[in-house]
Amino acid sequence: MNDSALGRRLPQLGAREKLAGRAQYVADLFRPDMLHGAILASPFAHARIVGCDLSEALAMPGVRAIITGDDFDEAWRMGAFVKDEHALAKDKVRYVGEPVAAVAAETEAQARAAAAAIRIDYDELPAILTPKEALTSDLLVHEHPERYFKTFDSGTAGNLCSRTEFAEGDIEAGFAASDLIFENHFHTQAQAHVAMEPCGALAEVDTSGRLTLWSANQSVFRVQACVSEALGLPMSRLRCLTPWIGGGFGNKMEAHVQPIVAALALKARRSVKLILTREEDFEMVRARHPFSIRIRTGVTRDGMLVAREVEVLLDGGAYADDSPGVLAFSLLCGRGPYRIPHVRCHGRVMYTNKLRFGAFRGFGNAQMTFATESQMDEIAGALGIDPVDMRLRNMMKGKDPWFGGQVPGSNGLLECVERVRDECGWQASPPAPTKPGRRRALGFALAGHQSGLLGTGAIVRMLEDGTLVLNTGATDIGQGSDTVLSQLCAETLKIPVDRIAVVSPDTDGSPFNWGTTASRVTFMTGRSVVEAAREVERKLRDHAAEMLECAAVDLELVEGGFVAVKGVSNLRVSFLEIAKRAHWQAGGPILGSHTWVYERPTIDPKRAAAVGLPFPKIGNYSFCAVAVDVEVDEVTGRAEVRRAWSACDVGRAVNPMLVEGQIEGSFVQGMGFALLEEMVWDGPRLANPTLMDYKIPTIKEAPDEIRSIVVESQDVDGPYGAKGAGEVGLVPVAAAIANAVAAATGARIRRLPLTGERILTAITSAPKQD
Amino acid sequence: MSEMLDVTLIVNGEQRVLEVPLAETLLTSLRDRLGYTSAKRGCNQGVCGACTVHVRDTTVRACLSLTANCEGLPVRTVEGCDDDRIMQALARSFEAGAALQCGFCTPGMLMSAHALLAANPAPSAMDVREALSGNLCRCTGYQKIIAAVLAAARELAR
């Protein structure tokens, strides 16, 4: 039996290295003669830099280089959508924690001491700390945002970072045709990524002055692009590599400290390593956007959704980063996986004097779905309809398009809903509280999420002995993409996975890969892997046809690395024999390659209108249904998730065990978002930048059971039918929990997180809350 | 500069003599002086558990332990557990059961699980939760970790 067979629960490649403690993350790398870096962060949310004095710091022991904003040209600005950010603050600081200067010294202690000895003179300015202030204030976070380069029609002006609008149907007619209209406001908090590995980088300059850069990343190519922009260097002067990655949930996609470390290494002409402390990681990197969401939905009395308007306002923080993308994607998810004929979703993301808000698993959809799926239960309750029935009546089925007009490559949502409904016992009587003084109920929610976007590629190369090297440039951030991509390659060539070596991503040698983000690697890169392997297969058959003196069409691959005459498996040649021939006699060494970029339009112009669309071609939707069994303590208000059911339609599970890992991990991260986690500001300063004060779920908070249900619907575009699995399972969790809390207590809370205090207040002040 | 001190540690069975500042943590000594990088710095504050190692067969947070306080004591990290029966069983069950993703919390998780199984060969799921409650994981959702520790206990009991 082929150990690569699709659907096999193959353990993660690299697991043994990790379990033996031998896997090296960026902090574990040491280079000869390496310096250590440290960053001086801004103590102010908003201030002009009027001067700096490096003399004391430069004279300190061990100091080899110091850089400030003056080391960077005005034009060297980076940004995925709006190029508004320097590697170090120049002229002005825009958030507490913003890097202002950096030091390279012989030891980390020396670097930190010298950073603390740098004197910066600031002229403090009033700070804009909320998006509402940003809308009305005369103060500007950026004086001249109109001068920034933008990748799309972002509408950037004043403190407006970007604005987007999507519309389908006729919204006014839709509301006019509705029997009832529901309007609610929802608010979500800033959530910290808390990948267990803090961000860091190690840069080395070779004798020609070329940089090699290892870092905690989700894409060596994004690192290369960001550093290139921030340092004004051609991309060809940078080689970006990856060690093992200690988790990435969006925080390691765009640049963090890489440009700073690269600049230090160039200035010192020595290797420099810089690893952020946990506090710095909280204050300096990025976090999930806080959203204010106004949602207005019109329905008929029999529970059909007719019209919806959604308006959002996002806190973008000091720099655009991924904000325009998060805004637009959240709006694209404003209809959810439902048929609503008349929809208008619009919103703005504002610059403020807070840290960057950016990509975080769910990419705006987690916030939006909290609102839409909470309101769905409210509507069902008001109409006296069962919440699951309400969803079944309205949800997308078959080839129903997503908002904007794109038809999903497959749709297994109905199976997700039915399986979760049946397995959680939705129609049975509600679960009994475990003790007096508790209330307990089930909650339900759905979601869809995309996995198709941007460019990717793969190269499959056969070595002289018939074994293979797979090179994709996709960083495995722990989710197991090396394993899944190897399985896809092995499946196509009918060989065991252990005959394939996976190349670590390298911008010098790997084909472009936009990144390990947006649930895209299995779907996008996986397809390239299969196509590249098929090219290898074609070449193998051509060789074998000549070797066996028959037609290539009469040949087939046979398990274990052979090409044989169809139906005559002993008339065969091995990959080894073919590889020898190709290398030394005829045809040339065998290599297959494939690249593609996702090309299905986000918006069908015949169906929908868009303003400020940052990504014209994204899509390919996965689906999820979640149910939770939540118990609320009447005395403390604390809610606990006892059991959870999560069904995800991933098209085809290349490795069901790893898909379950995504479902379970997504669930608990979503549960943290729903119940526990909140970045809190005391004025301009983050009040809880430590794991002591910012709580993520521990093993004790994890539900007694998470039932992961893998649904397969055979996506038309995906490799062997597979599509994304990385995010969709997180997206509906907060709403499902809020719905369970409401069902258990009667308290509808429209603000995350659902802390014990908020729940208790809502219960005691019911029926009107929040 | 802080005062330097000679300290002898028995790390993974090997005697190591170090000259360290009084305030140096065991985590810094293990990682930066001795190259035992399985102990991870996740928070440097004793919360995340990624730096969990054994001192005298008891779990400690290396980031909160001073090297100077470990004079003469046996210290064990995952690198020193290759031949350990409990660790081998845990490694097998973690691998087979996908009880790790990014792997950054894994060495600390293993050291805590090892201490549990050494003290309690037949733990309940609740015992596992208790023993691992000081080890944060952001990837797995913990379900497969609990299952893997229980599977290792069953394997060891056979």
Image (tube, coloured by chain):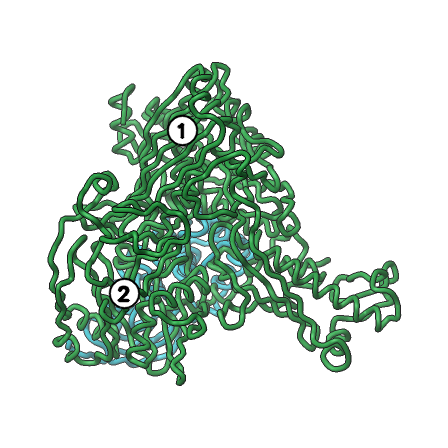
Observer-side mark, 1 or 2, equals: 2
Chain A: its colour in the image is: green
Q: Is residue A677 visible?
A: no
* Apparent side of residue A407 relative to residue A178 in the rendered image (left or right): right
* Apparent side of residue A268 relative to residue A682 in the rendered image (left or right): right
Q: Residues within 10 Å of mark 1 (few under 14, many from 20)?
A: many
Labelled pair 1, 2 in contact (Cβ < 8 Å): no
Q: Earlier in the sequence, mark 1 or mark 2?
A: 2
The answer to whether residue A635 is above or below residue A176 is: below
| Outermost residue, front side | A147
- Along the viewing direction, whichever of A481 and A587 lies nearer the viewer: A587
Residue A74 numbered mark, or none:
2
The answer to whether residue A393 is above or below residue A554 is: above
Q: Residue drawn at (17%, 48%), measured in percent from left and top?
A: A127
Which chain is indicated by disc 2? A
Residue A165 numbered mark, or none:
none
Residue A309 numbered mark, or none:
1
Q: Position of residue B48 (x, y in %)?
A: 33, 56
Quadrant housing the C terminus of chain A: top left
Q: Position of residue B85 (x, y in %)?
A: 50, 64
The answer to whether residue A369 is above or below residue A725 is: above
Q: Position of residue A172 (x, y in %)?
A: 42, 22
Quarter residue A400 falls in: top right
Q: Residue drawn at (38%, 43%), measured in percent from left and top?
A: A327
Q: Residue drawn at (29%, 45%), measured in percent from left and top?
A: A160
Q: Secondary structure at mark 2?
A: loop
Give the cyan chain's letter. B
